[in-house]
């Protein structure tokens, strides 16, 4: 079985993964989720939050266990997972993007939202930016429509009650991927066809422009860990199995060489 490290997205925290963690653990996987700085139950000041601090936290979590992990990023967490993997690639067995931003070197989250395929996205269209340093707040009514549209009422209410402000500064910073840093790390994508936060055309463009080993489409909203938990667990199990088989073939080849 695999080790999964789950990276949440904006306005969120480790709590967003709880139902999925139960499914993966029941299947025998080792599963870890954590709060990014300034998110969830982490009370780091927004003035100290950056893409660098996010990536550093990812690598700290990965370093706590010697087993390389399948790193799963949701939404903004795709940016964070990518930057973290570029910093400590030896600790990453594979990268999985769940309705997530999948950047190339030099792209920021905001850069990706400005692509033509991002037209119609509903997060930036609805957030309220306030304070200094600025944080973005997602109103409850917009969250229900944009993030949790396919979730049951009680599940959506549970999630909305736990949302937190999102520091803006990490969204503007471009990912830096040193040449060859992600070589040998398979990437996988879960594409959500009813996503209002990252429109499906933008998800498809990011997949097309990167080396993605496998794609699974789910007919659901932006938050499949809540709206299609069992199906997402099956997808992650499939990706982990594929990544493990690939690693085994590579190890056999090295022995033969």
Image (cartoon, helix red, strand yellow):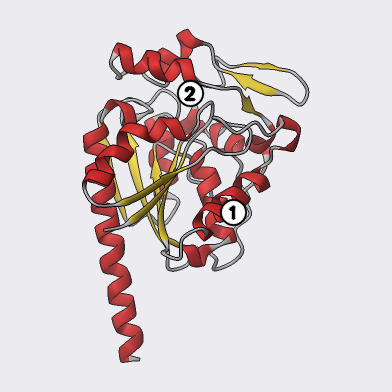
What residue is rendered at 28% in x and 38% in y?
A: 22
Taking the view exactly as shown, the residue that stands out farthest to the bottom is 257
Q: State the residue in front, 3 or 203.
A: 3
Q: Nearer the viewer, residue 119 or 105?
A: 105
Distance between the alpha carbons at the discs numbered 2 and 1: 23 Å
Q: Which residue is mark 1?
A: 105
Q: Is residue 5 above or below residue 182?
A: above
Secondary structure beneath disc 1? loop
Residue at which label 2 appears:
121
Q: Quadrant of residue 70?
A: bottom left
As displayed, is residue 217 above or below residue 2? above
Left or right of 2, for residue 134: right
How far across and down, in percent of the image, does residue 55 sit?
A: 60, 49
Q: Earlier in the sequence, mark 2 or mark 1?
A: 1
Q: Is residue 94 visible?
A: no
In this rendering, would 99 be left or right of 162? left
- Give the side of residue 149 with respect to residue 76, left or right: left
Query: In terms of depth relative to the viewer, which is nearer, 59 or 108?
Result: 59
Q: Is residue 45 above or below residue 73?
A: above
Left or right of 171 on screen, residue 247: left
């Amino acid at each position: 079985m695999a080790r999964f490290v789950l990276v949440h997205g904006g306005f969120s925290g480790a709590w967003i993964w709880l139902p999925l963690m139960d499914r993966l653990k029941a299947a025998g996987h080792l599963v870890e989720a954590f709060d990014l700085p300034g998110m969830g139950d982490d009370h780091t000041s927004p003035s100290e939050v950056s893409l660098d601090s996010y990536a550093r936290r990812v690598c700290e979590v990965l370093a706590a266990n010697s087993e390389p992990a399948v790193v799963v990023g949701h939404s903004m967490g795709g940016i964070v997972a990518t930057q973290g993997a570029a910093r400590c690639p030896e600790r990453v067995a594979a990268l999985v993007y769940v309705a997530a931003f999948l950047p190339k070197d030099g792209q920021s989250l905001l850069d990706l939202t400005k692509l033509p395929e991002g037209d119609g996205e509903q997060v930036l269209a609805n957030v309220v930016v306030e304070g200094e340093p600025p944080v973005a707040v997602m109103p409850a009514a917009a969250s229900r429509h944009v993030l949790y549209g396919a979730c049951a009422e009680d599940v959506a209410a549970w999630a909305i009650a736990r949302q937190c402000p999102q520091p803006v500064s990490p969204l503007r910073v471009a990912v830096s991927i040193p040449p060859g840093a992600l070589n040998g790390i398979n990437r996988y994508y879960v594409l959500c066809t009813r996503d209002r936060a990252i429109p499906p055309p933008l998800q498809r463009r990011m997949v097309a422009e990167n080396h993605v080993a496998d794609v699974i489409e789910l007919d659901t909203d932006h938050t499949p860990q809540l709206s299609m938990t069992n199906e997402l667990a099956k997808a992650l199990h499939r990706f982990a199995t594929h990544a493990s088989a690939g690693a085994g073939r590579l190890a056999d080849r090295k022995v033969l060489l």
